[in-house]
Image (tube, rainbow, N blue to C red):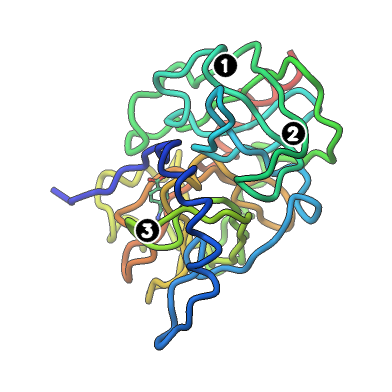
């Protein structure tokens, strides 16, 4: 068995504590090439990526990411919604910093989780939230079921999130982004064996590691050509050589997602 660090929601309390610590972390002198948040990324803003949503608890402590695909619909990971209810979650748009109070906060009126979802490593890690309040932000388009060519090995993909900046590290107060190459299905199967379900998942990362999503980035987007093509789902640890990040292969679910988005 792998000691899989299966995707988990970032504990909201950890995220809140990290908000204060992140500033110090980022400005600390670095003797070696330090891993950066996400892991190996750069800071960005929700102005640059207006569809990037924080999924938070009722106290607005972020624990996952999500992507605004219509004014009232957000695509995220099913595993982010385990144990949640419409009253326990909020979606926050237009807020670059975890410790910010700006932007738009919406309650959630419906949580759709893929009906076959059980565990991120079994696939079907997709959920769609319906918002009670419209978000006044530019939405992202998402893949259609026929766009399977997008995942050609070596294609550059972009990931975004407020997740931990190293394995077992602290969350980033500021939104971060990184680019990672798509990994072939055979390459990902050699990393993860039967936990990698190619019909439902796609991997991205460098064989040498160093750049990756990590805890708290779950549910957020993997963009290819600016289009939502994946959802941050799971991996063994973060940014480890030979263990790319695993993302929901959204082409497999775009029909189901569209039904929710248009309902
Ligand atoms: C997580 O726990 C998580 N390196 C997200 C992404 C990855 C691993 C764990 C991929 O949310």
Residue 150 shown left or right of residue 57 in the figure: right
Q: Nearer the viewer, mark 1 or mark 3?
A: 3
Which secondary structure, mark 3? Answer: loop
Task: State which quarter of the image contains the C terminus.
Answer: top right
Q: Is mark 3 within 8 Å of ligand 1?
A: no
Residue beneath disc 1: 111
Q: How many marks?
A: 3
Does label 1 or label 3 sit earlier along the sequence?
1
Q: Nearer the viewer, residue 21 or 174?
A: 21
Q: Nearer the viewer, residue 181 or 238?
A: 238
Indicate the position of residue 214 as horizontal and vertical percent values.
43, 54
Cα–Cα span, label 1 and label 3: 30 Å
Indicate the position of residue 138 as horizontal and vertical percent values.
84, 41
Whether residue 249 is situated above or below residue 181 in the rendered picture: above
Indicate the position of residue 246 as horizontal and vertical percent values.
42, 50
Residue beneath disc 3: 169
Indicate the position of residue 102 as horizontal and vertical percent values.
76, 39
Which secondary structure, mark 1? Answer: strand
In the displayed image of the protein, which residue is found farthest to the left?
A: 1
In the displayed image of the protein, which residue is found farthest to the bottom?
A: 31
At 70% across and 25% down in the image, what residue appears?
Answer: 258
Crowding near pointer 3: few (<14 within 10 Å), some, many (20+)? some
Q: Which mark, residue 69?
A: 2
């Amino acid at each position: 068995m792998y000691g899989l660090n299966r995707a988990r929601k970032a504990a909201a309390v950890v995220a809140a504590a990290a908000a204060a610590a992140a500033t110090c972390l980022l400005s600390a002198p670095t003797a070696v090439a330090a891993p950066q948040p996400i892991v190996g990324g750069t800071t960005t803003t929700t102005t640059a990526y207006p569809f990037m949503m924080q999924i938070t608890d009722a106290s607005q402590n972020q624990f996952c990411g999500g992507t605004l695909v219509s004014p009232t619909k957000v695509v995220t990971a099913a595993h982010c919604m385990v144990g949640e209810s419409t009253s326990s979650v909020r979606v926050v748009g237009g807020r670059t910093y975890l410790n910010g109070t700006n932007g738009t906060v919406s309650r959630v009126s419906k949580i759709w989780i893929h009906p076959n979802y059980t565990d991120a490593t079994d696939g079907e890690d997709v959920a769609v939230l319906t918002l009670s309040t419209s978000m006044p932000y530019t939405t992202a388009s998402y893949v259609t079921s026929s766009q399977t060519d997008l995942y050609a090995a070596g294609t550059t993909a972009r990931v975004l999130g407020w997740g931990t900046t190293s394995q077992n590290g602290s969350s980033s107060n500021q939104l971060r982004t990184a680019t990672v190459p798509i990994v072939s299905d055979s390459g990902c199967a050699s990393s993860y064996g039967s936990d990698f379900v190619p019909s439902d998942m796609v991997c991205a990362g460098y064989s040498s590691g160093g750049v990756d999503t990590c805890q708290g980035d779950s549910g957020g987007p993997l963009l290819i050509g600016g289009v939502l093509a994946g959802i941050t789902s799971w991996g063994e640890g973060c940014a480890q050589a030979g263990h790319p990040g695993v993302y929901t292969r959204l082409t497999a679910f775009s029909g189901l997602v569209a039904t929710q988005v248009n309902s």
